[in-house]
Amino acid sequence: DAGVIQSPRHEVTEMGQEVTLRCKPISGHDYLFWYRQTMMRGLELLIYFNNNVPIDDSGMPEDRFSAKMPNASFSTLKIQPSEPRDSAVYFCASSLGSGGRAYEQYFGPGTRLTVT
Amino acid sequence: GDSVTQMEGPVTLSEEAFLTINCTYTATGYPSLFWYVQYPGEGLQLLLKATKADDKGSNKGFEATYRKETTSFHLEKGSVQVSDSAVYFCALSYKTGANNLFFGTGTRLTVIP
């Protein structure tokens, strides 16, 4: 299996621009998670999906952030407009859920976003 | 609420030293417990897990035992190597319901030759 795929690996953009991060989960996984990692705040869960449906978006910092999962093999995280404080590494993770078990999350390599 | 507390880092050890990274948790139910590792420039990888009290998870020479009485899941390794240098995250999740992980803040380990 190719694992979780994220693109781009690095993104540098100017304040005010729109940024779109992409994720392809592991085939067959029915949960998808978006995380943000910074030195100051550590690893934060932004949103997660189950069967393409957003379940909990309480971690999304503000309305500038949005996430979609149009099908089981693709998700996007969009920031519009971007700000310097959005600079972070954004991780996508996926897992397989079936009743009564604990599930391991598999992380992608991350997208390092720099907003100048 | 549910949470995980890890020992403050960073931790610096000489090669072949004994490693302990403390992790305690607060949970309302009976979670599963995990240790994830993040090598420089990479995403997190599952290192080991334990799904019920007294279970011992182990992998690559690392071990952790699920201690319900002390609500702990300390990570240990008898002899660390330079290649073990990474950030280690303790986490918990539940077997049913929400499938999200609650992560600790991470502990950076540096092993020097």
Image: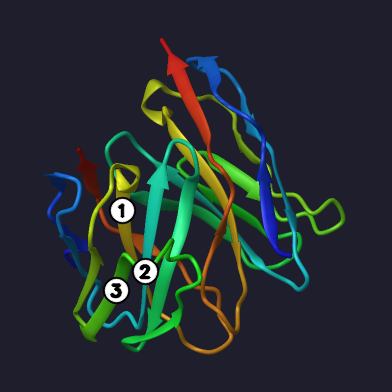
Is disc 2 in contact with disc 3, using a CB cutoff of under 8 Å?
Answer: no
The residue carrying mark 3 is A67
Q: At 42% from the left edge and 66% from the top edge, which residue is drawn? A: A60
Label 2 lies in what chain? A
Label 1 lies in what chain? A
Say the numbered circle drawn on residue A90: 1
| Residue type, numbered disc 3 | Ala
Q: At 44% from the left edge and 44% from the top edge, which residue is drawn? A: B37
State the separation of the CA atoms marked 1 and 3: 12 Å
Secondary structure beneath dot 2 equals loop
The answer as to whether the residues below labels 2 and 3 share one chain is yes
| Residue type, numbered disc 2 | Asp
Residue A41 versus residue A23 in the image, above or below: above
The residue carrying mark 2 is A63
- Front disc: 2 or 3: 2
The quadrant the N terminus of chain B occupies is bottom right
Mark 1, Cα crowd under 10 Å, few <14 / some 14-19 / many 20+, is: many
